[in-house]
Image (cartoon, helix red, strand yellow):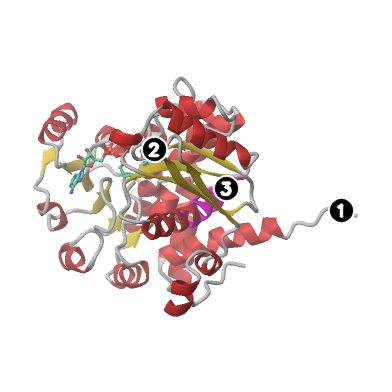
Amino acid sequence: MFEVKEIKETALAENPVIERMSQYNHEQLLFCNDNATGLKAIIAVHNTTLGPALSRTRMWAYNNELEALHDVLRLSRGMTYKNAISGLNLGGGKAVIIGDARKQKNEALMRRFGKFVNSLAGKYITAEDVGISTADMSYVKMETDHVVGLPGKSGDPSPVTAYGVYMGMKAAAKLQFGSDSLSGKKIAVQGVGHVGEYLVEHLTKEGAKVSISDIHEDTLQRVAKKYNASVIGLEDIYSIDMDIYAPCALGATVNDDTLKKLKCSIIAGAANNQLRNEAIHGEVVKDKGIMYVPDFMINAGGVINCYAEVKSFSAEWAMTKAEEIYNRTISIINRSKESNIPTYKIANTMAEERINAIGNIKLPM
Ligand code: NAD
């Protein structure tokens, strides 16, 4: 079901939409246009085997439609894998609104978008992402019930995400160092925003030696002072003597350049798409003996938090679910060691196995 089709460039040029959908087996795309509000959006539903597609809506000033299409197809597929491996009964989807959020976003546009979400009758559930606030989601909610992340509901997902990352990090430490205690371990956290700061709190409580970097000097100094963490330069973070590197800012920081410098034994952080090129850098990391905890698995706390809101589960339920990231990390790393296959590939396979297994359940006669 998940085999990736090789598609020739000519075919893509002639059939830019459906050929691209079929490459990763997307179920449905909804192109949304409304001249009155200026809304231009794409909602992608990748796979609903496990349940409705849930993910955030991003508003971004894409250079062209093809760029938006590429983004929405890639991100919606990623959500299928994240939701599947996290044991959630959710499929994968994504929505992008094309435009400048600071200039074009208003009540009418968000409500018009909400009507489009509603037209999918629950197949896609949305929440806020880059360029969209929880207040914007309140407008969406006026037109559809298929929305989460509203003010006063599940709230900021970052504490759940940080807890999941902390759990995954401890599990990797158990297999790499023989104990899951992080006490005395040298850990570098890149980016101390929402998730990074909560992670630093867990780590310092446990007695880890934490170094932090951030492009915002005020944030950096505040967090350093609050948790007695060491401050480190933006580039120096790749070359310092550390046990664990925790990327919690940007994607693609594990790449040809940084891998020449990184001396860590574990990579475990919240950022999405940490490996610049999965196929290349996933192998290099493994060959260097570094345990890479797959990003989409370890950072699933955010979607777990949204799922709790969909199901009206408690905040405690979300934390307990995030705790499962510990055992999942152990399984992935053990399978990777047994098979000599990189951890990112094992995680993808585990997600596919669950989708295929649940998809094959037959109703009794
Ligand atoms: P955030 O914007 O609150 O924090 C990111 C921090 O990184 C900011 O303080 C920013 O100044 C800093 N930063 C940016 N560039 C940097 C650089 N080059 N070096 C060092 N610091 C830099 O974001 P967040 O919500 O904490 O999320 C962090 C990462 O985790 C993002 O990649 C996000 O996509 C991912 N993520 C977050 C959640 C969540 O629940 N918030 C869930 C899943 C994944």
The reply to whether the magenta stretch includes residue 84 is: yes
Identify the residue under disc 1: 364
Using the numbered discs, state the Cα–Cα distance from disc 3 to disc 2 in whole angstroms: 17 Å
Identify the residue under disc 3: 87
Number of residue marks = 3
| Circle 3 SS class | loop
Residue at 28% from the left image edge and 45% from the top image edge: 248
Q: Amino acid at mark 1?
A: Pro
Decide if residue 149 is in sight here: no
The C terminus, quarter of image? bottom right
State yes or no: discs 1 and 2 in contact (Cβ < 8 Å): no
Q: Position of residue 364 (x, y in %)?
A: 86, 53
Dot 1 alpha-carbon crowd within 10 angstroms: few under 14, some 14 to 19, many 20 or more: few
Q: Amino acid at mark 3?
A: Gly
State yes or no: discs 3 and 2 in contact (Cβ < 8 Å): no
Label located before the other in sequence (1 or 2): 2
Label located before the other in sequence (1 or 3): 3
| Circle 2 SS class | helix
The N terminus, quarter of image? bottom right
Decide if residue 142 is in sight here: yes
Q: Amino acid at mark 2?
A: Tyr
Label located before the other in sequence (3 or 2): 3
Indicate the quadrant where residue 107 lies: top left
Identify the residue under disc 2: 163
State yes or no: discs 1 and 3 in contact (Cβ < 8 Å): no
Using the numbered discs, state the Cα–Cα distance from disc 1 to disc 2 in whole angstroms: 40 Å
Region in magenta: 77-92
Residue at 34% from the left image edge and 43% from the top image edge: 99
